[in-house]
Image (tube, coloured by chain):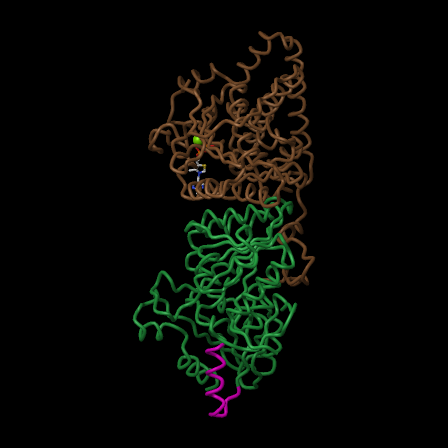
Chain colours: A brown, B green
């Protein structure tokens, strides 16, 4: 395991409030959410091999504790935005697994009406702002969500996720500068799974740890062990508190690992089977399971029953997606422009544009 | 009717719309304390304060993306590019995010945002600073592209753009900021997507926009002395294209010349020419002709740059060619 603690902070004070202790049921719920993501994606993987899912499909397998842990300290009306490895974030935000799977199948019942695909999940009602395919492109957007939250006086915060590869995009640094300069309530979360596609972090990124990048902006920075959901929760809580109470941004680096290829089309020749096997030994779901059993929060039988439940949910999502209708061809022309309400509609001839 | 410069007209539009709606704010380089690189935002900081008139660092990708995110969240930002030439470092944000998020999300998000700033050549600032990129943006589904030529349209169209619930690229023309003309007082909007006949004529239809509308009008004045009557259409909005106004005019003149500052390959005029031949073939008495910038990077030297631009001599020669 890469070292995950201790927290590195750049001279910013910790916000005072403390992470509340979880009730047994809440702990079980975290376990359930992680396992749902895993079972959901196992189904997705199967559907991809059956060619029911096309295009790019990036699995979150191994990283579940990051989305579940970080989002667990948010309020429902806080904002979440991430890159294309987005299935986990959407599911944790509460997007219906059926709608997620249907999106992967390109069906009209999908969470983006079959127009986004795996990389572009969206769920406005649940404050999930996507699902973004251009590496790093979502970080300025997330900074803007936080800008608007502050402008409107909402006291809400934004979690903006990116991969370890994305941290090398210029726009990410521009956005971090703006957030620090304008004191925006945003938490940037690098999900460092050690690879950007086939390029290891050692070959892509100068400076270790990545949280050092925050130093230039005098921004708070903190690291967490992404295989340990309790650590993820504790560290994210600090960052979220700083955002909410002092309107200050934080850069978090959460060390994690993905077990499968970059996407379903990646043979993975850049790392050894041994490496993956070794990492699987510190699996976040197994680790948490052991902890819950040790704490006698739950019995093994009860956890097995949860596994059955979420597996059934994943299967139901698969069936739902499979049986859902294709979008009608006319939907090609829908969802391009928002209806106007302050000026006349100015493109009734849209369909005629050749 | 009061007379205003193009710059003052834009300033009034911004000011009036910001007064109407608290969610409208302006951000960009030097827009606040410096009053804008071209003084379009003059006095707005004093009037609306630093929460709503925001100086940004030189980070087009960063603040453009930030503004798009803020628009997703319900604000109605106006983003000023010091010039549209600098929008290139924010191209990804405008195209992949502003233009496409609504579609990719199945209609869940609206992006009510205006990107605006100066554009165009003729100021001897060299190739990096002289772009006329309306055709680059018009090529992208989801974007509305507006290029006003006169102060009244500058004001009325900017007000409409700010009230639109969709992303609008609003390309002002650097050479026109000082141009003075009458502007109706008060809350007068100009409809987006409607061209305007700026001069009536019977021999040929000249389709133009922005600075090229002025070139076309000047050429038409000179041609009138030679007994040639030109009808000049100012597109005002590039996309959506008001083809109906073009068709009505061509039915009368049967001849078409397009004048645009884009480089020739896939400039918006190529689209107009295609639609004219496709839909008005029987109306035509001569092939459609087009005057564009010459297909080279913009030279600094003044004599060379004037030759590169679709100048009046080239417009006049082209009219005569079509009528020959
Ligand atoms: C601007 C851009 N360049 C390249 C790509 C192709 N691409 C997609 S994901 C990826 C690797 C990104 O790795 P990282 O940021 O670490 O995220 P991870 O996939 O590990 O979650 C690349 C190169 C892209 N989508 N966007
Ligand atoms: Mg990575």
Instruction: Give the magenta part as a residue range.
Output: B214-229
Q: Measuring 50% from the left and 58% from the top, which residue is drawn there? A: B137
Q: Nearer the viewer, residue A267 or B9?
A: B9
Q: Nearer the viewer, residue B199 or A272?
A: B199
* Residue B79 falls left or right of residue A334: left
Q: Name the spot of residue B129 as percent of width and height, x first.
A: 38, 62
Q: Measuring 68% from the left and 63% from the top, which residue is drawn there? A: A344
| Residue A100 in sight from this viewpoint | yes
Q: Quadrant of ligand 2?
A: top left
Vertical placement of residue B243 versus A27, above or below: below
Magenta segment, principal secondary structure?
A: helix
The stretch drawn in magenta includes residue B216 = yes
Q: Name the spot of residue B36 as percent of width and height, x first.
A: 46, 61
Furthest residue toward left: B301
Q: Name the spot of residue A321 as percent of width and height, x first.
A: 66, 33
How many badges with numbers are in the image? 0
């Amino acid at each position: 395991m890469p070292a995950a603690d201790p927290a590195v902070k750049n001279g910013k004070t910790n916000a005072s409030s403390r992470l509340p202790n979880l009730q047994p049921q809440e702990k079980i719920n975290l376990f359930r959410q992680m396992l749902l993501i895993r079972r959901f994606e196992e189904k997705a993987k199967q559907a991809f091999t059956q060619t029911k899912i096309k295009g790019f499909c990036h699995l979150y397998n191994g990283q579940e504790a990051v989305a579940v842990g970080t989002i667990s300290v948010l309020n429902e009306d806080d904002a979440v935005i991430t890159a294309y490895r987005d299935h986990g974030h959407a599911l944790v935000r509460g997007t219906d697994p059926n709608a997620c799977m249907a999106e992967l199948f390109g069906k009209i019942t999908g969470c983006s009406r079959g127009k986004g695909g795996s990389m572009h999940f969206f769920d406005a009602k649940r404050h999930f702002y996507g699902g973004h395919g251009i590496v790093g492109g979502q970080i300025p957007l997330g900074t803007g969500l936080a800008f608007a939250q502050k402008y409107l006086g909402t006291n809400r915060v934004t979690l903006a996720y990116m991969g370890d590869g994305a941290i090398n995009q210029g726009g990410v640094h521009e956005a971090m500068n703006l957030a620090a300069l304008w004191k925006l309530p945003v938490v940037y979360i690098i999900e460092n799974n050690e690879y950007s596609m086939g390029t290891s972090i050692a070959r892509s990124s100068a400076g270790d740890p990545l949280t050092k990048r925050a130093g230039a902006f005098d921004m708070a920075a903190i690291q967490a062990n992404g295989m340990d959901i309790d650590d993820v929760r504790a560290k994210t809580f600090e960052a979220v508190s700083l955002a909410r109470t002092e309107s200050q941004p934080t850069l978090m680096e959460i060390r994690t690992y993905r077990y499968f290829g970059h996407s379903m089309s990646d043979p993975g020749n850049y790392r050894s089977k041994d490496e993956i096997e070794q990492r699987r030994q510190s699996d976040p779901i197994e680790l948490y399971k052991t902890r819950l059993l040790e704490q006698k929060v739950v019995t093994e039988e009860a956890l097995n029953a949860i596994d059955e439940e979420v597996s059934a949910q994943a299967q139901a999502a698969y069936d739902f997606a499979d049986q859902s209708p294709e979008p009608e061809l006319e939907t090609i022309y829908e969802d391009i422009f928002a209806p106007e309400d302050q000026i006349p509609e100015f493109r009734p001839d849209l369909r005629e544009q050749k | 009717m009061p007379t205003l410069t193009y710059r003052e007209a834009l300033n009034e539009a911004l000011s009036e719309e910001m007064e109407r709606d608290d969610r409208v704010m302006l951000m960009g380089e030097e827009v606040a304390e410096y009053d804008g690189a071209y003084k379009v935002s003059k006095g707005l900081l004093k009037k609306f304060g630093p929460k709503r008139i925001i100086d940004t660092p030189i980070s087009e990708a960063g603040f453009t993306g930030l503004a798009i995110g803020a628009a997703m969240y319900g604000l109605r930002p106006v983003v000023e590019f010091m010039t549209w030439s600098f929008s290139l470092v924010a191209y990804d944000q405008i195209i992949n995010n502003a233009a496409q998020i609504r579609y990719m999300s199945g209609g869940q998000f609206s992006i009510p945002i205006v990107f605006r700033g100066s554009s165009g050549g003729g100021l001897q600032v060299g190739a990096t600073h002289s772009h006329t990129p309306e055709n680059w943006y018009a090529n992208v589904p989801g974007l509305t592209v507006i290029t006003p030529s006169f102060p009244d349209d500058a004001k009325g169209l900017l007000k409409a753009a700010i009230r639109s619930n969709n992303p609008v690229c609003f390309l002002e023309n650097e050479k026109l900021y000082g141009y003075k003309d009458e502007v109706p007082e008060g809350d007068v909007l100009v409809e987006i997507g409607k061209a305007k006949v700026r001069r009536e004529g019977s021999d040929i239809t000249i389709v133009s926009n922005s600075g090229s509308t002025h070139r076309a009008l000047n050429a038409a004045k000179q041609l009138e002395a030679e007994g040639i009557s030109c009808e000049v259409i100012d597109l005002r909005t590039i996309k959506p294209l008001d083809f109906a106004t073009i068709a009505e005019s061509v039915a009368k003149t049967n001849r078409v010349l397009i004048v645009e500052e884009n480089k020739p390959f896939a400039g918006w005029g190529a689209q107009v020419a295609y639609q004219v031949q496709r839909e008005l073939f029987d109306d035509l008495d001569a092939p459609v002709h087009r005057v564009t910038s010459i297909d080279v990077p913009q030279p600094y030297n003044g004599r060379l740059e004037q030759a590169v631009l679709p100048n009046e001599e080239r417009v006049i020669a082209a009219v005569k060619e079509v009528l020959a």
